[in-house]
Amino acid sequence: WDIVVLEEDFPDLFDDEKISPEQRVDELNLLYVATTRAKQHLVVNGIVQTIVRLVHSKAKKAGMPQGGVTSGAPA
């Protein structure tokens, strides 16, 4: 799809009381599939924004180079 919009209807993947480990794996797989289908534009939801922030934070703590999200096609 050219444009993929992720709605706010994913369960809270970080709340152990609301989602089982098996459900978390299923939801993360679904989220992966949804995000990798966008050809031109991906409109992310709160869960994806949280995951990106966590990954950047952990990478920074590990001393990894920091990159950013860019718009448009890769050069």
Image (cartoon, rainbow, N blue to C red):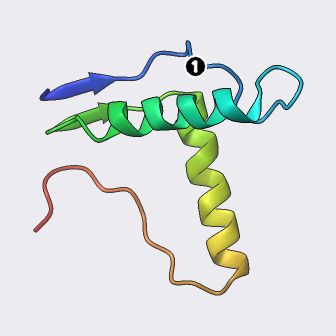
Q: How many marks?
A: 1
Residue sticking out furthest to the top: 9
Left or right of 38, for residue 17: right
Q: Residue 32: x, y in percent?
A: 41, 40
User: Residue 39 placed where, x, y %?
Assistant: 14, 39
The amino acid type found where label 1 is placed reads: Phe
Q: Which residue is mark 1?
A: 10
Query: What residue lies at 51% left-to-right and 83% top-to-bottom?
Result: 65
Label 1 secondary element: loop
Quadrant in the picture for residue 75: bottom left
When asked about the image quadrant of residue 54, the answer is bottom right
Q: Is residue 49 toward the left or the right of residue 21 in the image?
A: left
Quarter holding the N terminus is top left
**As rendered, which of 19 and 7 lies closer to the eye?**
19
Would you place residue 31 above or below residue 11 in this image? below
Q: Is residue 75 above or below residue 14?
A: below
Q: Residue at x 30, y 34 (%)?
A: 42
